[in-house]
Image (cartoon, grey):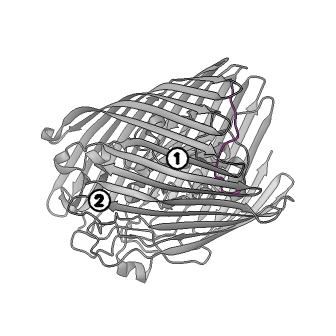
């Protein structure tokens, strides 16, 4: 049976009742302190992709993808260069943040299909497994409506050669529905040699009765990108749009097939997803010594996640119990060669695999003013590495990890609610990290003890949510640029003990019938707390970030917003010893959008970085004899975009 409730949420624009999937079921008791972005908010923001919507509406700090795609690395709790490895991302129950050193490919998701996005900050390993210490992002797509036909066509053009075409169609009958979505993006991007071509297809069909549904979904992506590389400080100051790597490029093809089903038997609900993802690609690059690197890769991931939920209710309480298992298997194959300038060729070939089996259980108990949630997870991993060139570096090892959490909330009055959370989360090294460690040894799992306390205050059109948090980490997996590696300085290691702690404030208010204001503020301290670097700050973590957004919704077919984001200074990625003496400068950007509906048509004009500020939020320095202020990846200048959309 369905169990919809009004969620305790932090929304980026307006406060509305929604149902959320806090227990990996379609509608359930809300996860405490969740942020929910609705389809309406996405539409009003003019976001062209899921990643952009998360950054604009929820105020999540993101770093540009170095390959020029829209898949920015999202940082929920100050994890710096490894932020995307500490956030678990799911689409309709299927994990898309996988066993590789890349951000989740959210650009493969058609934005028009998204019903809502749920963001939970903080450790979430009980339900979602490894790599969720920073938090989780759940993307839920729309279900087809019975006996309806709907669709849209969207065309966008902008400077830097930006052209984006999207089309979607959905058709529903009494018990059967199907949908199809196409997307084609072409852009030169801001810098030289940063062109991007991307084509997407997603489609699905499902059959549903009063108590069950079953369906199939297909998601495909074809991507060709040019890689501009980094700049020295002098090159950046001379011309931030230039490249020193005019010949570097790469391509990626990805296909995912998902079979899903669920059945409702009075108070018991069963659900499962079975998914297979195949990906292949290649890359080419020339270094400063005229050496050439050619690489081909293939990978596949299979997931199966059956689970059961039991709901019981009385006049005094409601209780939800969930138990499930997760099975996953991934394989990564890489073949490459480094063609040195005058010293011969150096081939490489490897195959890595990972299998995981997990069982978890969670219980949510709610009284009139109190909610208590607790859960446990046990997961076994088997990691295998085969170096086809040097068999002495092979390994096959197994290990197990446990996670738990205990959460509670209490409604003190109609205005004030308090909530708290304690738990343990974990992360395991992915295939790319393990293949670039000391002597190719498997890295130890990262474990975190997580603490959080917060309060929400809601009065009329105003809501304020404040949290304090701490993550005490052991064996954090990180790239240490000061240690010698096989290809120069730098290697993946397990750090000495580290800590993340800070404050988050999320506020929304209605200024009038047509104007609303939202703000998100985060302060985070990220430090090493033991070992030879005790007391040092972690690199690429701004201590403070702030997002402010003014919305205009007069209700006459027009909408507009103005948004600003400020990001504090941060250490260069190579400044692990905190001795560089300078930091990546703080910066602020200004965005805006205006739209108007004329019948079935909608037209919009939007812009980002409207002040055309030259800035960069990502720089790694040069630990191989260069300046600690080099390795700069400039962000884009002023970008303007015109959008035309027709709905039918």
Q: Quadrant of residue 394?
A: top left
Q: Position of residue 39 (x, y in %)?
A: 69, 47
Residue at the image point whose x is 15% and y is 63% from the top: 342
**Residue under circle 1?**
420
| Residue that lies at the very extreme toward the top in this rendered image | 265
Residue 208: percent from the left, percent from the top?
A: 69, 22
Whether residue 595 is visible, yes or no, is no
- Residue 631, placed above or below residue 136: below
- Residue 172 position within the rendered picture, expressed as x and y whole percent measured from the top left: 76, 30
Q: Could you give the CA–CA distance between mark 1 and mark 2, rounded to whole angstroms?
A: 24 Å
Q: Is residue 34 magenta?
A: no
Majority secondary structure of magenta residues: loop
Residue at image point 27% right, 74% down: 579
| 1 or 2: tag closer to the N-terminus | 1
**Is label 1 in a helix, a strand or a loop?**
strand
Q: Which residue: 61% across, 27% down?
A: 319
Task: State which region is magenta.
Answer: 2-13
């Amino acid at each position: 049976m369905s169990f919809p409730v009004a969620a305790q949420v932090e929304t980026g624009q307006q406060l509305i009742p929604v149902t959320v999937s806090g227990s990996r079921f379609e509608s359930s008791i809300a996860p405490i302190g969740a942020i929910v972005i609705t389809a309406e908010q996405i539409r009003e923001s003019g976001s062209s992709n899921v990643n952009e919507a998360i950054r604009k509406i929820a105020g999540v700090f993101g770093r540009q993808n170095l390959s020029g795609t829209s898949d920015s690395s999202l940082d929920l709790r100050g994890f710096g260069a490894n932020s995307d490895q500490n956030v678990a991302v799911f689409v309709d129950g299927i994990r898309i943040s996988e066993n590789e050193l890349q951000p989740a490919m959210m650009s493969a998701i058609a934005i028009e299909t998204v019903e809502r996005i749920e963001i939970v900050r903080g450790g979430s390993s009980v339900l979602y497994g490894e790599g969720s210490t920073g938090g989780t992002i759940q993307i839920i797509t729309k279900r087809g409506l019975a006996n309806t036909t709907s669709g849209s066509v969207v065309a966008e053009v902008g400077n830097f050669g930006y052209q984006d075409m999207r089309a979607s169609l959905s058709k529903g009958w009494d018990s059967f529905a199907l949908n199809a979505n196409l997307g084609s993006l072409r852009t030169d991007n801001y810098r030289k040699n940063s062109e991007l071509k991307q084509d997407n297809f997603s489609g699905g069909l499902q059959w549903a009765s009063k108590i069950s549904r079953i369906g199939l979904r297909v998601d495909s992506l074809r991507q060709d990108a040019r890689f501009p590389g980094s700049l020295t400080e002098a090159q950046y100051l001379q011309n931030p749009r230039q490249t020193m790597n005019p010949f570097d490029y790469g391509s990626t093809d990805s296909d995912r097939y998902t079979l899903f089903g669920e059945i409702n038997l009075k108070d018991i609900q069963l659900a499962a997803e079975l998914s297979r993802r195949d990906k292949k690609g290649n890359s080419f690059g020339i270094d400063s010594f005229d050496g050439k690197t050619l690489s081909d890769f293939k990978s596949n991931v299979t997931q199966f996640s059956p689970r059961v939920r039991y709901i019981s209710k009385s006049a005094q309480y409601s209780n939800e119990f969930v138990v499930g298992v997760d099975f996953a298997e991934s394989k990564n194959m890489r073949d490459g060669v480094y063609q040195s300038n005058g010293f011969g060729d150096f081939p490489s070939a490897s195959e890595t695999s990972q299998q995981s089996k997990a069982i978890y259980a969670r219980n949510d108990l709610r009284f009139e003013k109190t909610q208590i949630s607790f859960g446990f997870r046990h997961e076994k991993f088997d990691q295998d590495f085969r170096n086809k060139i040097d068999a002495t570096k092979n390994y096959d090892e197994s290990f197990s990890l446990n996670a738990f959490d205990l959460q509670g909330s209490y409604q003190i009055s109609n205005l004030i609610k308090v909530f708290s959370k304690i738990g343990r989360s974990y992360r395991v090294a992915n295939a790319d990290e393990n293949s670039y460690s000391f002597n190719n040894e498997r890295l130890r799992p990262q474990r975190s003890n997580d603490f959080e306390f917060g309060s929400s205050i809601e009065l009329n059109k105003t809501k304020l949510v404040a949290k304090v948090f701490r993550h005490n980490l052991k064996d954090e997996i990180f790239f240490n640029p000061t240690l010698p590696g096989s290809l120069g300085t730098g290697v993946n290691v397990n750090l000495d003990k580290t800590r993340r702690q800070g404050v988050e404030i999320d506020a929304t208010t209605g200024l009038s019938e047509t104007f609303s204001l939202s703000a998100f503020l985060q302060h985070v301290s990220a430090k090493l707390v033991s070992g030879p670097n005790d007391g040092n700050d972690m690199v690429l973590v701004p201590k403070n970030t702030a997002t402010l957004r003014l919305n205009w919704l007069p209700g006459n077919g027009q909408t507009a917003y103005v948004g600003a984001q400020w990001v504090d200074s941060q250490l260069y990625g190579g400044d692990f010893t905190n001795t560089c003496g300078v930091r990546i400068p703080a910066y602020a950007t200004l965005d805006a959008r205006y739209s108007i509906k004329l019948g079935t048509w909608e037209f919009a004009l939007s812009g980002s970085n409207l002040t055309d500020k030259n800035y960069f939020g990502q720089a790694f320095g040069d630990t191989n004899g260069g300046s600690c202020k080099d390795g700069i990846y400039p962000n884009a200048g002023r970008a303007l975009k015109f959008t035309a959309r027709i709905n039918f």
